């Protein structure tokens, strides 16, 4: 490869790093709850639709996490009743009654901390108020220790067909570092049993580049994913967030992790090479490697191609018919009307999360002049072996995938600078 390690001062590791870029150029318009409610009584358009449900509770906090969550200190009965009532309330709107949803995604927190009867209360409300497409995807994020057969039976009865399990690593040292439950062999055993019992996709998350992680450990993670035949794995470099236990415990290590680009790159390459070695898995998205006949990850496809994501639950955010929604509390939410530029460049950022960027998709959202700016940057990336231009697409190379979030941010800033004469 060319010397691509120093292309950018910092590697952006998540799609969320691009949030807020457009607000530097043009502000979104704040609107009220009444305005949002009026939108829900309009005829819904034909864009793809997802529902995101947030559960801001865990029974055990991971060392690296600063997400909108807190440790359970009592019953979740009232929160489960609140979520069920939200589906009942919105189920009466025209938006819900005339829409078919492709995806429901339960995130957190840990949405499997609910007791079986609490899960059933929520899932029954969904069944009564949401119409799903024939090929719907219904996901719960989970940990292994929060699952049991009783919960799984309830979930399968109500159509849950995808689990995303927070594993992070199979390494014994790494699991201690991340404050995970169970050792490697127990994790493998539980994943195998889960895959045998659950009728749907079993996917996991891997987080690499914990302190002193070896090449052998990251290769072993990849081999175990393939050995178990898991439907997909996310693959993120460790991000040490302010407010997490990790940021307080290892301040010196945090700086090392952010600056050690070479190690980040080497571990990434070895995991990727091992996952793709037998051609049984493929790169589905910048941080997702999927089995060829496995996970389709429709949730990210809906979000990244301009579809709606209807948010439910404290801490949930999304976009509905051009209105941004963020729920800060049970009775408190922030609404904003998204400008043409927010919608356009949000969609561009989403499309660039995939390893193959189709020219026609880009031309459908950019003006002719904006597309010229886009093409110019793509040619620059091609000269650096980050992109290969083909007749109908720009295909990211392995290095291009590694730097994918940086490319997305770089190209959006470049086009917006041209548009607003910065």
Image: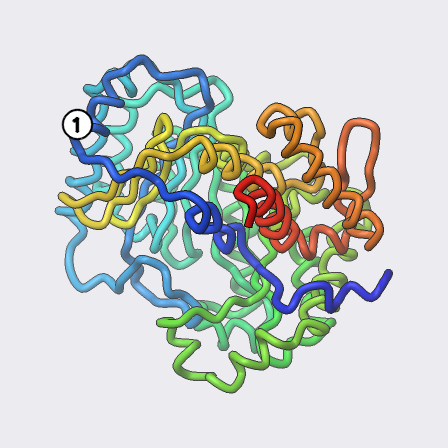
Residue 295's x, y, as percent? Answer: 59, 37
Name the residue tied to disc 1.
Answer: 89
Residue 230 in view: no
Total numbered labels placed on residues in the image: 1
Q: Which is more toward the observer, 190 or 215?
A: 215
Residue 278's x, y, as percent? Answer: 82, 47
Q: Residue, x 67% and y 32% (percent of image)?
A: 371
Q: Which is more toward the observer, 82 or 229?
A: 82
**Left or right, 244 with reference to 193:** left
**Left or right, 38 with reference to 205:** left
**Left or right, 408 with reference to 387:** left
Vertical side of 83 occupied by 287: above or below: below
Quadrant showing the N terminus: bottom right
Q: Residue, x 46% and y 84% (percent of image)?
A: 251
Residue 264 falls in which quadrant of the image?
bottom right
Q: Which is more toward the observer, 174 or 252?
A: 252
Q: Residue, x 39% and y 59% (percent of image)?
A: 145
Residue 387's x, y, as percent? Answer: 78, 46
Vertical side of 390 occupied by 376: above or below: below
Q: How is the image coloured?
A: rainbow
């Amino acid at each position: 490869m060319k010397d691509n390690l120093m292309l950018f001062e910092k590697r952006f590791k998540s799609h969320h790093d691009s949030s807020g870029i457009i607000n530097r150029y043009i502000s979104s318009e704040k609107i009220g709850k009444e305005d949002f409610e009026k939108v829900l009584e309009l005829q819904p358009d034909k864009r793809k639709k997802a529902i995101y449900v947030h559960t801001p509770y865990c029974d055990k906090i991971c060392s690296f996490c600063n997400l909108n969550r807190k440790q359970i200190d009592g019953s979740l009965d009232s929160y489960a009743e609140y979520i069920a009532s939200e589906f009942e309330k919105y189920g009466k709107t025209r938006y819900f009654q005339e829409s078919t949803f492709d995806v429901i995604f339960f995130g957190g927190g840990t949405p499997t901390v609910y007791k079986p009867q609490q899960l059933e209360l929520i899932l029954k409300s969904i069944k009564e108020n949401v119409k799903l497409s024939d090929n719907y995807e219904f996901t719960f994020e989970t940990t292994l220790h929060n699952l049991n057969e009783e919960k799984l039976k309830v979930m399968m009865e109500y159509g849950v067909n995808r689990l995303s399990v927070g594993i992070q690593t199979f390494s014994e040292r790494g699991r201690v570092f991340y404050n995970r439950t169970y050792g490697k062999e127990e994790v493998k055993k539980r994943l195998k049993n889960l895959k045998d019992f659950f009728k749907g996709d079993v996917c996991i998350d891997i987080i690499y580049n914990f302190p002193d992680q070896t090449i052998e450990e990251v290769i072993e993670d990849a081999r175990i994913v393939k050995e178990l035949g898991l439907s997909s794995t996310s693959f993120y470099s460790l991000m040490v967030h302010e407010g997490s236990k990790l940021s307080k415990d290892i301040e010196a290590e945090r700086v090392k992790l952010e600056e050690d680009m070479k190690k980040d790159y080497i571990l990434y390459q070895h995991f990727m090479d091992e996952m793709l070695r037998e051609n049984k898995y493929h790169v589905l998205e910048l941080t997702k490697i999927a089995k060829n006949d496995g996970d389709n990850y429709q949730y990210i496809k809906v979000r990244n191609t301009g579809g709606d994501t209807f948010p439910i639950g404290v801490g949930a955010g999304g976009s509905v018919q051009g209105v941004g929604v963020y729920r800060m509390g049970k009775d408190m939410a922030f609404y904003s009307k998204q400008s043409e530029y927010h919608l356009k460049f949000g969609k561009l950022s989403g499309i660039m999360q995939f390893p193959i960027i189709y020219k026609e998709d880009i031309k459908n959202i950019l003006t002719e002049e904006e597309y010229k700016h886009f093409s110019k940057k793509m040619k620059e990336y091609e000269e650096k072996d980050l992109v290969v231009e083909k007749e109908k697409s720009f295909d990211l190379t392995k290095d291009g995938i590694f730097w994918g979030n940086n490319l997305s941010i770089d190209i959006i800033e470049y086009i917006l600078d041209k548009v607003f004469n910065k």
